[in-house]
Amino acid sequence: MDLERQNGSAARQEPVQEVSSGVLDVPFLVLTLLLTAIGLVIMFSASYARAYADKQNSTYFFVRQAIFAVGGIVVMLVITRFDYHLWRSVAFPILAVSILFLLLVLIAGKTINGSTRWFELFGISFQPSEIAKFAIIVVFATMISSYKEKMKTFRYGVVPFAAILGGIVALLALEPHLSGIIIIGAVGALMMFYGGTQLRWFLIGAAAAGLFLLIYLKVNPYAMQRITYWQDPFQDASDNGYQAIQSLYAIGSGGFFGLGLGRSRQKYLYLPEESNDYVFSILCEELGYVGAMLVILLFVLLIIRGFWLAMHARDRFGALMIAGLITLMALQVFFNIGVVTGFLPPTGISLPFFSQGGTALMLNLFEMGVVLQVSRKNGTSLMI
């Protein structure tokens, strides 16, 4: 406990310093780069038919994604050179910026399929909810590190966290953005659990979340419609159930070993969002059960290694930052694969490192860079 106080005090009093030397965690770095490389290959295979049809250039989406991947790797490596405690000093400004963008997107955002989730700045399109996810992690890590044993009380362990989550969720509900609400709510709740909030408050919170979901589905017919056609997509196979059915066709036709890289049939404009939310379906079709399981295994290894780094972090703040970021990635992987396989209703959550979207990929790599920041301080295995 004394060590935690000293670390927390040092983080508040000492200026942010560049880490000129240190070690990065080799397994985590290699797994991140490997998933990025495989993701680029699969995204190219899944996107070239759509790129040719829409842009008359089969490499259009791949080239953009590759540029963002290189930029993201550079950013990932650069931020590892700095002390990760800098996030503690800018946590609440980041939260303020995320709230500002969530407000702005409601006023001047881009509406797609009835939802206003996208904001364009300097020609780059992004979802402010992605900034909010990182803001929740860094703010909650900061607060939990400060409150320590007070996390078991209602005043410190519940009220401030619920107030922040409630504000973010309310803004997301106005877009509307159910998948963002689910991810941010789950990450926030799990970070509170990691921090020591008592279990009874989670039971009350789960009941409140269930009530909110029922009300949300009542006032949002589009969301309710998704649930209905998820249960039986064949009742409207040509419209509302079309995407789910085509995804299952892709997965089923892949069989055990797949049709071969580049040989998917569903990507030829049969499966919507084939290089975005449903890129895993194309992966299954081309690489089969074996390829899909290997990719899932890589994600599992990355997640396990991430939590190992969290358990070996030098202070509570670093541990919570890693735990939050790895939890976020794990939830996104679970929900995306759950949706494309028909296990979960459609949520609009992309697959990290694989789905088309340059800003999302850069943010994935940036977040892995923060994990590597802490691993450098841990002293694990690679000097750069």
Image (cartoon, rainbow, N blue to C red):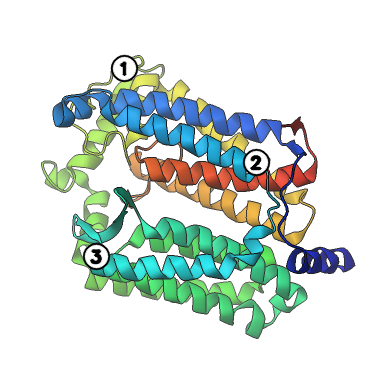
Residue 290: x %, y % from top left: 47, 21
CB atoms at circles 3 and 2 under 8 Å apart? no
Kindly indicate the quadrant of the structure image that contains residue 141.
bottom right
Query: Residue 251, can we see it?
Result: no
Is 320 positioned to the left or the right of 7 in the image? left
Query: Residue 325, can we see it?
Result: yes
Q: Where is mark 3, residue-wise?
A: 108
Q: Which amino acid does label 3 sit on?
A: Ala
Residue 27: x %, y % from top left: 68, 31
Kindly indicate the quadrant of the structure image that contains residue 271.
top left
- Judged from the image, the secondary structure of the residue bearing numbered disc 1 is loop
Q: Residues within 10 Å of mark 2 (few under 14, many from 20)?
A: some
- Judged from the image, the secondary structure of the residue bearing numbered disc 2 is helix
Is the residue 116 above or below the residue 40 in the image?
A: below
Q: Which residue is drawn at 49% across and 31% down?
A: 36
Is 204 positioned to the left or the right of 21 in the image? left
Q: Residue at x 42, y 48 (%)?
A: 335
Residue lying furthest right in this view? 2
Closer to viewer: mark 1 or mark 3:
3
Is the residue 1 above or below the residue 237 in the image?
A: below
Residue 38: x %, y % from top left: 46, 25
Q: Where is mark 2, residue-wise?
A: 304
Q: How far apart are marks 2 and 1 (CA)?
A: 31 Å
Q: Where is mark 1, residue-wise?
A: 262
Is 19 positioned to the left or the right of 253 in the image? right
User: Mark 1 or mark 3: which comes first in sequence?
Assistant: 3
Viewer-side residue, 343 vs 173? 173
Viewer-side residue, 335 vs 129? 129
Q: Residue at x 64, y 56 (%)?
A: 321
Q: Residue 82 carries which label?
A: none
